[in-house]
Amino acid sequence: MRRPRSAERLRDAATQAVVLAGALALAAWFVGNTLDNLSERGIASGFGFLDSTAGFSIIFTLIDYSELSTYGRAFLVGLLNTLLVSAVGIVAATILGVLVGVARLSTNWLVARLATVYVETFRNIPLLLQIFFWYFAVLGAMPQPRASLSLFGVMFLNNRGLFVPKPLLTPGFWIASALLAAGTAAAVLLWRRARVRGVATRARAIFCLALALIPAAAAALIGEPVTGWSLPHLAGFSFEGGAVLIPEFVGLVLGLSLYTGAYIAENVRSGILAVDKGQRESAAALGLSRGQILRLVILPQAMRVIVPPLTSHYLSLTKNSSLAAAIGYPELVSVFAGTVLNQTGQAVEVIAITMAVYLSISLVIAGAMNLYNRRVARIGDER
Amino acid sequence: MRRLPSLFLIAVAGLAVTAMPAVAQKTLEAAKGRGHILCGVSQGLPGFSNPDAKGNWSGFDVDFCKAVAAAALGGADKVRFQPLSAKERFTALQSGEIDVLSRNTTWTLSRDTALGLDFAGISYHDGQGFMVHKKIGVKSAKDLNGATVCSNAGTTTELNVADYFRSHGMKYKLVTFEKSDDAFAAYVKGRCDVYTTDQSGLYAQRIRLDDPDDHLILPEIISKEPLGPATRQGDDGWSDIVRWTLFALINAEELGITAANAAQLKAESTNPEVRRLLGSEGDLGKNLGLDGDWALRAIQAVGNYGEVFERNLGSGSPLKIARNVNALWSKGGILYAPPAR
C-alpha cells in the first residue's frame, strides 16, 4: 500500500501548488490592473505620500504633532489614539461586565433586576446612537469654560474637557520609572519563588518591597524627576497649559464600554451558570464565605467558558472604536482613512494600510487572549 | 454601526477600480444605456442639495445635474442622486459610481491632477468664513486667538483653518466631524467657540437654528473656494458636455433667456448668439455629440443661472444670499462664461 499513498500525496501537493499559483496570479493581476487603471485615470499611486506635509491639525495627540508633520506622523497619531481608546474601553467594559454579570445572579431582587435592565437596554440600542447620546449628553451637562467646575483651583471641568496639571518631566523621571518597573518585576519574581518554596517569611517580604522601591526612590532623589507642573489656567476662550481629556474621548469610552459591557455581563453570567452547582455547595460545606466561593471556586472555573467569547467582544470593541469619526475623536479611521484619504485621494493605499492595521490589532488581541485561555483552560480541555 | 460598512464601501469601490476593464467606457453611452445619469450630491445642505421628506432632491447643485440630464438625455428627471460624505465623494467618482460630482466641491490643483478629476468650471464662487455666538463678543476673525473650532473632516476647510491661524500667529484647537450636521450640533452645544465652513454653508446652517440672530458670521473670508461640478479624467467628451451645460446656463442669463421664454426665443429671436445657443442656427450641439436642442432643454428644465441661483440660494429661498461676486461680469460680479460659438 506504499505506492498509492505516495501517489496520493503527490497529487495532493500538486493540487495545492496549482491552487496557490492561481491565487498568486489572481493577486498579481489585481495589483497590476489596479496600477494600470490608476495611472490611466491620472490618479497618483504609491506610498510616497506618507512623507508629505499633512497641513492639518489634530485635537488630541499622544505624540508631538503639528501642521508641519507628515501624513505618516498623522497615521501614527491616529493609530495611538485608536489603541488608547480601545485599551481603556476594554478595561472599563471588562470591569463593568464582570460586576453586572455577577449582579444579574444576585439573590437581591433589586440588584438582579437593575442589572437585567442595564443589559437589555444597552445591548439593544445601536452603538452609534449610544455614542451620540453620551457625547451630546456629556457636552450638554458640562458648563462653559468661564463657568468651569474647579477642584482646588488646579483641576477644571467644562465642555472643552477635563483640564489637569501636567508634570514637566526630565530624563530622571524615565530612569526612575524604569528602575521602579524593573525592581517591581524582580520583587514579584522573588516573592513567588519564595512562596513556592514555602519560605515566604515577613523578612523576605520586606526585602522584596525594598528591592522594588529603594533603587527607584534613590534615582528619583538624585535625578529630580519632575522639575515643575504645568497648571491649566483660563486664557482667552478656554484653558491653556496642563493636560486635557477631551469630551470626545469620554463620550466614546462611555459608549463603547457600556455597550460591550452589557455583552460581557451576559457572557460572565453564562460562564458562572456553567459551573456545576455541586461546586458551590461543596465550597459552602467547607465553610468558605460567599465572596471566597465566588473568587476562589466559581470564577476560576467560569473563566474557561468566559474567555473564548470574551476575545470576540474585545475585537468588536476595538473595531467599533472607528465609529469615533462621527463625534470627532481623532482615531485611525477619522484621521487616516478620513482626512488623509481625502487630502491625498489615494484611497487604495490608505484603505489597504487601515485594513492591515485593524487586522494586526485583532490578531494581537486574539493571540494574547488565546495564550490566556490556555492558562485558564482545564488540563483535560487543552488540545 | 455605520462606520465600518462605509469603510467597506470604500474598499469595494477601490476593488471596483481594480476590477474595471482597462479602457473606460464612454460615460454618455453608459448613461444612455441605463436611461439616467448618476449625480453625486451632499448628504443634505440646504440650498445646494437637500432631500425633502419624500426623498425628492432640490437645490443649486441638484438643479445643475437636472440641467445636464436634460441636455444629455433629454429629460430633467433622467438623473439619480447619490448622497456622499465629503470623504466618499472622490472615490465614488473615480470608481464610476457616479458620472458627475455636483457637491459644493472646491476646485484645487491637487484634486484636478492627483485625484484624476476634471473640473467643469466654477458654478459658485465661495470663500471660507467663521460663525460665532454673539455673546462671546468677537467681531473679527483676528480676535479668535486660542479659540476652539468645529468643522467638517476631509475638506479644504481643515487646511485653510490651519493656514489662517498659523499665518496670523494665533493658537487654535480644531475638532473635526465626519458630517457637517454633527460638527454644527457640537458648535451649538458649546463644544466650540467657532463653526467654520464655506460662507454659503454658514448661511445654510444658520437658518436651521432656533435663534439665528444670536449668531454672527464674521466679515473675514479666509480662502478662495471656487465650487464646481467635476467629472472623471479621461472622458473628454463627457467633461465637455458637463462644462458647456454650465456655460449654457450662465450665457443664458447674459442673453436674457429664461425657462419661460426659451422656446419663444428659439423661434423668434434675431440675436445670432441666442440663435446659436438655442440651436436655431449652426450645429453646436453636434460638436458635443448631442442634438441641437441640448441647451434649450437644459434652460427649460431649470432656468438660466440667475433663476437657479435666486430660487435655491437667493431671494426666492430662505437663505437670501446676495449675488455679490457670483453676479455676471457685466453686472459687477466675476461670473463669466466663454461664448457658445
Image (cartoon, rainbow, N blue to C red):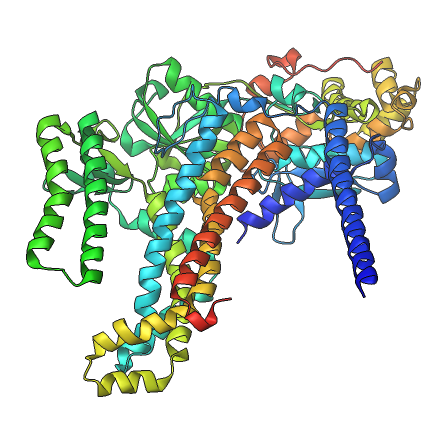
Extreme-front residue of the structure: A2
Which quadrant does the N terminus of chain A fall into? bottom right
Residue drawn at point x = 28 percent, y = 42 percent: A159
On the image, the x and y values in percent for residue B113 come to 67, 19
Relative height, residue B107 to residue A191 (above, below): above
Residue B189 in the image: state x and y as whole percent.
35, 44
Is any part of residue B103 visible from this angle?
Answer: no
Which residue is painted at 65% across and 32% down in the image?
B90
- Considering only vertical position in the picture, is A95 above or below B199? below
Q: Position of residue B20 (x, y in %)?
A: 79, 37
Compared with B75, A301 (above or below) is: below
| Residue A240 against residue A288 in the figure, above or below | above
Q: Residue at x 13, y 37 (%)?
A: A215
- Residue depicted at x 63% and y 41%: B10
Please indicate, yes or no, whether residue A284 appears anywhere in the rendered image: yes
How many badges with numbers are in the image?
A: 0
Of residues B308 and A312, the one drawn nearer to the viewer in this rendering: A312
Between B148 and A257, the one lying in front of the other is A257
Q: Quadrant of residue B312?
A: top right
Classify residue B98 as left or right of residue B263.
left
- Frontmost residue, A231 versus A18: A18
Q: Is residue B181 found left or right of A139 in the rendered image?
A: right
Residue B13 appears left or right of B237: left
Q: Which quarter of the figure has residue B217? A: top left
Residue A289 percent coordinates (x, y)? 19, 79
